[in-house]
Image: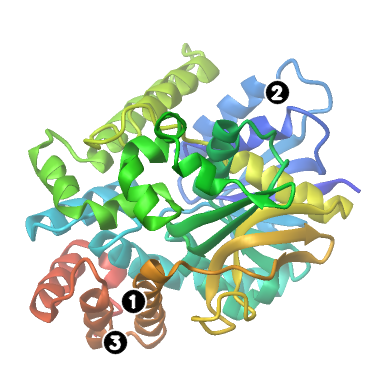
Amino acid sequence: MAERLTILGGGGFRVPLVYGALLTGESPISEVVLYDVDHRRLAAIRRVLDAQARDVRHAPRVVATTDLTDALTGAGFVFSAIRVHGLEGRVIDEQVALGEGLLGQETVGAGGVSYGLRTVPVATAIARRIALVAPDAWVINFTNPAGLVTEAMAAHLGDRVIGICDSPSALVRRVLRALGIAPGGAAVAYAGLNHLGWLTAVHSGGHDLLPRLLADDDAVASVDEGRLFGAGRLRTLGAVPNEYLHYYYDTEAVVRAELAAEETRGEFLLRQQSECYARLGSPAADPLAAWTAARRQRDATYMARSPYRDDAEGGGYEEVALALMTAIARDERTDLILNVRNRGTIALLDDEAVVEVPCRVGAGGARPLPGAVVPAHGAELVRRVKMTERAVLSAAGTGSRAVAVRAMASHPLIDSVPVARRLIAEYQARFPELAYLR
């Protein structure tokens, strides 16, 4: 049965990746509805999608709207990829944190808390609207901070909201390739939160092959995470961390690099995408060529300032989204690493906590596979970050500035009430979306 896919944030730069995935084979999607509050960006991305579909038979029909209820009505799937306050917000997140000598990355540390505080109220309102006008839709959340936002939406949508991220699947793909195992040829053990997880085992033929990989310096060096963290550290951990653990393990080096850089990552993306959207608005421009050139530049510079990493392999979230939608729509059993409610899977967290673990997907949605274990060295970090997420949810729900300060102070990369007070005050001064905190 063909389904209608609604993309929230339909004027976003990466929307053509999702649409492109729908064009590469048989997909369950017959119509794509683009929703955005910015009609100019919406029109620009619509031009790119039209160019993508030009020579493709049976390409999903595309419509665009700035009316949320119209966009959601009749949807079988809703893909949420919104960015509250746009890339300008990401720049502010980075600048304010760096002003305190702290990491301002959009999902980690001060920037992540700020992003969550202004995004959760919007995501909650969207979840309520979906529950009213499209109660049978499956919601795929890619809005960052993905685990936190998925947990906020789950309070209204239950298990019908599933969070996705490309980092775990890309990590697994790289490790299997280094071991000479075909995709899907092994069962992996992975556990944690979004942007805070570890690959702890690769089971094939009755054996765990991860120790073999970690013992081989050349094999480790063939994996991006091996170059990022180093073979010695991986052997000490007995696991391969998600790339985002770099921000926790090497914080001082990352902050030094950010402070020394001519522009932050957010500033680069804002400049690049502003130029790209300006070109897309010109009738003389080839929309697909302009967008493709900008995407390649974006991918080539991902984590480029890391002192440990030179050629990160990014991307892939669109394949995760397509695999998820196909498995649900056609009841084809598929195993994916997803963000879902814990349901007793990770013992150190409660049942309602959204975690990132291997899941089995079918017509009934995604169910976490048993046996996910956070390594002992990561347990306290996971607890602390989940405590921060819960404080963000509480602050967003109550409008309490004091709770927002507590959320900021509780994050392990901040760990200071006075600093947290200054950060919240500055973020409130810069973001009208945080005026609700009193």
Three-letter code for the amino acid on which mark 1 is drawn? Arg
Residue ID at (15%, 43%):
258
Image coordinates of residue 92 in percent, x first then y, are: 21, 53
Give the residue pinned by disc 3: 400
Question: Could you classify mark 3 by the number of other residues whose Cα lies within 10 Å: few (under 14), some (14-19), or many (20 or more)?
Answer: some
Pointer 3 or 1: first along the chain: 1
Q: Mark 2 points at which residue?
A: 53
The residue under the point 53% across, 63% down is 191
Mark 2 or 1, nearer chain start: 2
Number of numbered discs: 3
What residue is disc 1 on? 384
Q: Pointers 3 and 1 in contact (CB under 8 A)?
A: no
Q: In this rendering, would 140 be left or right of 262?
A: right
- Residue type at mark 3 is Ser
Can residue 9 be seen from the camera position used here?
no
Q: What amino acid is at disc 2?
A: Ala
Number of other residues with Cα within 10 Å of mark 2, as a class: few under 14, some 14 to 19, many 20 or more: some
Badge 2 element: helix
Q: Is residue 254 left or right of residue 322?
A: left
Q: In which quarter of the image is residue 376?
A: bottom left
Which residue lies at the image location 51% right of the left edge and 74% below the top edge?
152
| Relative depth, front residue between 376 and 293 | 376
Q: Where is residue 10 in the image (x, y as percent from the top left)?
A: 55, 44
Relative to 406, say whether 106 is above or below.
above
Inter-mark Cα distance, 3 to 1: 20 Å
